Amino acid sequence: MSTVNLLTASSTYRTKVSQRNDGLFRVIMPAALRRNLNLSIGQCVRFGTKNEDVAMVKSKNNLGIKIGKGGLITLPAHLCSKWRIQKGDFLKLEESSGKIYIRKDKCKEAI
């Protein structure tokens, strides 16, 4: 299953990409980041892109991607194709001013 490792003392996390049976990719959003955005299981998040950054924000009208059990989130298809995401890749999740920024982590090994 996916692993989440704390990178630094800041709110930056590494999460491993897993794949569902239907081919969709998903990651775990750490509980600490969910708390920072005041999110709970069953609520929805939206993804927005600006340049190369992808930011995840709380959805005000419950449209978007629902947070599943254990904080699992299905990644949007456009993000997966843009970054050529595969099962086993690592993503960095960093919380800043009410948004979670997602970046592909070049490191392929667990810490």
Image (cartoon, helix red, strand yellow):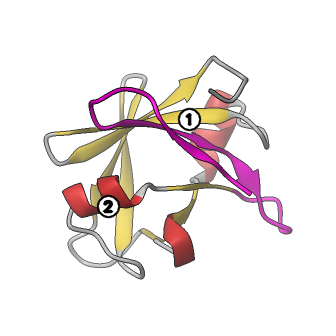
Q: What's drawn in magenta, residue-wise?
A: 1-25
User: Front-most of 92 and 63?
Assistant: 92
Q: Write down the residue under mark 2.
A: 34
Cα gap from disc 1 to disc 2, whole angstroms: 16 Å
At horizontal 63% and vertical 48% (from top left) the residue drawn is 3
Mark 1 belongs to which amino acid? Answer: Leu
Q: Position of residue 10 (x, y in %)?
A: 27, 31
Q: Residue at x 20, y 67 (%)?
A: 38
> Dot 1 corresponds to which residue?
91
Q: Nearer the viewer, residue 82 or 4?
A: 4
Q: Amino acid at mark 2?
A: Arg
Task: Check the image and name the residue furthest to the right.
Answer: 21
Image position of 107 with respect to 26: above or below: above
Q: Residues within 10 Å of mark 2 (few under 14, many from 20)?
A: some
Q: Residue furthest left?
A: 97
Callout 1: SS: strand
**Residue closer to the observer: 3 or 68:** 3
At numbered mark 2, what does the secondary structure look like: helix, strand or loop?
helix
Q: Quadrant for the C terminus, please.
A: top right
